[in-house]
Amino acid sequence: MSDQPDPRSFLSADRADGSIYNDPALFDMEMDRIFMHNWIWVAHRSEIPEPGDFITTFVGPHPVIVSRDRKGTVHVMLNRCRHRAATVCEQHKGHTASFVCPYHGWAYGLDGALRGVPHQNGYGDDLDKASLPLVNLRVADYQGLIFATFDHAIPDLDSWLGAAKPWIDLFMKQGAGWPVKTMGEHKFTFPGNWKIQLENTTDAYHFPIVHKSFLDSVDQETQDILNFVGGKGFVEDLGHGHSVMVMIPELVDLDDNLDAPIPERFLELAAQLAETYPPEKVRQIIRAVGGSGFNLNLFPNLACSMAFFRVLRPLGVSQTEIRHIAIGMDGGPDIANQARLRLHEHFQGPMGFGTPDDAEAWDRVHRGALAGRDIPILLNRGLAHEEKRADGHLYSDVSAETGMRAAYRQWLAAMTAEPAGETVA
Amino acid sequence: MTITLDEAVALVTLEADLLDHGQFHDWLGLYTPGGRYVIPIDPDAEDFENVLNYAYDDAAMRAKRVERLLGGRSISAAPPAQTVRLLSRYRMLASDGDACTLRCAQYLKELRQHRERDYAANVTYRLVRTPDGLKIDLKVIRLLIATEALTAVSYIL
């Protein structure tokens, strides 16, 4: 272990060394200690609604299949045949009764059980199929968010999410009474470390600077709503590396303030909805279409970010994949979901009016952090007036770096933890 | 009078030239007022309104996109990437009176901040004859890598 870097040497309470973004040995440690020993978000319930549905994705660098078996139980399994390690599925999503390895035809059930081995008599008695399922990770879900981990010893998902759970509940009010469903995603990469992205979702400070051209493209009322730096919002450290950044306090609970005036940009949609729905429901749908007023960062790879899920995946020390998953109302009015899709396209994705500018900033951080040695990255914004309140949580203003400090505290805890228990693989 | 292949190719070639040379305001004038500029994600998507796209621009969004590229207030587009694109493999799928559907291949090379990238795409146009001449009523750009992870595209494909 002596050749591993000491994570403590990269971090102090309010700053990080620039090499935290580009040390390959540190990255290898992260893939083990963070991505194999924490709950990692893998899917939303609506991506695999029916028995037999599956998607393929990743837990850190590990390819996995997320499937729903005949009884409705969700499995997260390594996408690796137990014979000679070939991936058994390369489809991004689909519906199936089994996963058959294309190499020698070993067949697995939706729960990963090894069902069939061609010409099994070639093994004599030397093959115990019951001991060779696809390797199942530990799985748990909350409010449709499905998480998995290699580690069977870490605390359960409920205690891991802890104080973040009420915020997840609030975020899901974007269903306007219907379940939330995913509606497609924008997937893109940027040349830089994953933690640059982790920081960004709890960084209100950049918004009016980086997103000038987006703000130019929306109406005055929306510009005013998004002019939140210096406003009444706040950042709260929720523990375990999670944090919430409330940018628009009026849009925390979408079921509140239903008598507030409908924003001008939604008047036409409201008029159309009023042909089908009573006034109260119209207002609930309109508030849901506009999205939540906060970003909830769940360490290490998911953010419930205003109106979408942001998922990060480290591809290498200097390469990161981001997915911005659109969400909508499952069973809700088409015109409302169309409005959400258009709002998502406006800001998100490689051709959105927001994301390319974010990506440019992250790219610049990556390249700039290669300049010089022993120059700290500052994480001290908002520290001067940060306070611990009665609930034991740290709070500071909306543009504080409280959420980044929270994430890095958890990063350090995970990176320096003694291995607590057995992993499944 | 039926739109000929030559007429159609002349229009889409003009569009390509305007985009590669940053003449975005002129580009806006090539479209009908109700025209759409679409970059889908799903290769099979036809009902673009009900799915997530990379771009699903009406006239207002096209104008905003141009403003963003020329306004100098977007760090990813200040300056916009330089592009060179080739259109080829033209085929008139349908031509009926005042409208036609043209399909072609587009190969584009991008240079920005010392990085070259390229994008191949199938492009389908619906062109219509108007009192002001031939206009684009629909352009659908199906990127070969639409379902893969892209990088930021701060220009007009």
Image (cartoon, rainbow, N blue to C red):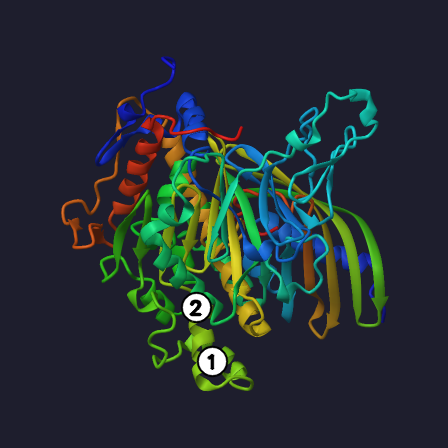
Q: In the image, what residue type sits under mark 2?
A: Gly
Q: Earlier in the sequence, mark 2 or mark 1?
A: 1
In this picture, residue A398 sits left or right of residue A334: left
| A268 in relation to B36, above or below | below
| A339 in relation to A363, above or below | below
Q: Residue furthest top?
A: A2
Q: Residue furthest front?
A: A125
Name the mark on residue B110. none
Viewer can see residue B78: no
Q: Residue B57 in the image: x percent, y percent?
A: 58, 63
Q: In the image, what residue type sits under mark 1?
A: Val
Between B12 and A9, the one nearer to me in the picture: A9
In this picture, residue A60 sits left or right of residue A404: right
In this picture, residue B149 sits left or right of residue A368: right
Residue B30 falls in image quadrant: bottom right
| A419 in relation to B60, above or below | above
Q: Residue A292 in the image: x percent, y percent?
A: 39, 63
Q: Which residue is mark 1?
A: A282
**Secondary-structure class at tag 2:** helix
Residue A102 falls in image quadrant: top right
Q: Residue B133 in the image: x percent, y percent?
A: 72, 69
Q: Chain of mark 1?
A: A
Viewer can see residue A380: yes
The crowd level at tag 2 (other Cα within 10 Å; few <14, some 14-19, many 20+) is many
Q: CA distance from mark 2 to mark 1?
A: 12 Å
Q: Residue B52 in the image: x percent, y percent?
A: 59, 59
Between A153 and A150, the one nearer to me in the picture: A153
Q: Which residue is mark 2?
A: A290
At x 57%, y 73%, the residue is A335
At x 32%, y 28%, the residue is A18
**Same chain for the residues at labels 2 and 1, yes or no?**
yes
At x 69%, y 72%, the residue is B132
